[in-house]
Image: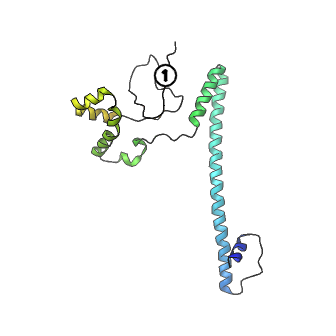
């Protein structure tokens, strides 16, 4: 029976054939089921390949535009290479750290719960700095206000966080990875 079922899905032949209406109905049903399953699997594979192809074409299109811009503006070879390598690194598949703002259901929580969530997430982070540790003791309300104004960011390799001479607008706490800075003269 198993051998007969397999031959219905493949080009192989089998000497056993249905002899009555129930067996014929079963054989035809099995063939239709095989066609449906095969079509579904094939369609899924085709869809995935097309999505990958589309993403690849989009990436190449963007790279082509950037390269055209570099050539038209007659940028130096060093700067052009820096631009392209930075954009390629950013285009690499990276799994950024999950941020609370990236989870839509968390935005729908009541304000009191969201405030408590931010306090539990960010208080340990800022407590490593002596100023904030003392502030929590001296003025807990201000400590909570600071926790509620903190936002999270994921920075990709090679991305600049700040530049010399720009006004200070924020403070960064690095929770993972590495950062370096250099003073350009």
Residue at the extreme bottom: 20
Residue at the extreme top: 185
Q: Please, what secondary structure does the residue beneath circle 1 have? A: loop
User: Which residue is located at x 37 percent, y 47 percent?
Assistant: 106
- Horizontal and vertical percent for residue 95? 51, 41
The type of colouring in the image is rainbow
User: Which residue is located at x 73 percent, y 73 percent?
Assistant: 7
Q: Would residue 34 appear left or right of 144 to someone viewing this image? A: right
- Horizontal and vertical percent for residue 81? 64, 25
Residue receiving disc 1? 181
Q: Dot 1: few (<14), some (14–19), or many (≥20) neighbours within 10 Å? A: few
- Horizontal and vertical percent for residue 43? 64, 58
Picture layout, residue 1 above or below residue 159: below
User: Which residue is located at x 64 percent, y 61 percent?
Assistant: 41
Picture layout, residue 80 above or below residue 98: above
Query: What is the quadrant of residue 10 in the picture?
Result: bottom right
């Amino acid at each position: 029976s198993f051998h007969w079922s397999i031959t219905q899905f493949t080009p192989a032949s089998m000497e056993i054939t249905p002899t009555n209406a129930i067996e014929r109905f079963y054989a035809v049903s099995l063939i239709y089921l095989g066609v449906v399953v095969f079509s579904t699997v094939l369609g899924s594979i085709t869809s995935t390949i097309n999505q990958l192809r589309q993403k690849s074409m989009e990436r190449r299109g963007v790279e082509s535009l950037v390269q055209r811009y570099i050539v038209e503006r007659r940028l130096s070879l060093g700067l052009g290479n820096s631009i392209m390598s930075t954009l390629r690194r950013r285009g690499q598949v990276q799994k950024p750290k999950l941020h609370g703002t990236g989870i839509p259901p968390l935005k729908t929580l009541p304000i009191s719960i969201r405030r408590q969530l931010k306090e539990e997430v960010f208080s340990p982070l800022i407590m490593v700095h002596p100023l904030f540790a003392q502030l929590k003791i001296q003025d807990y309300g201000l400590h909570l206000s600071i926790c509620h104004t903190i936002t999270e960011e994921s920075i990709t390799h090679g991305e600049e966080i700040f530049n010399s001479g720009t006004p200070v607008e924020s403070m960064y706490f690095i929770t993972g990875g590495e950062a370096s800075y250099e003073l350009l003269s």
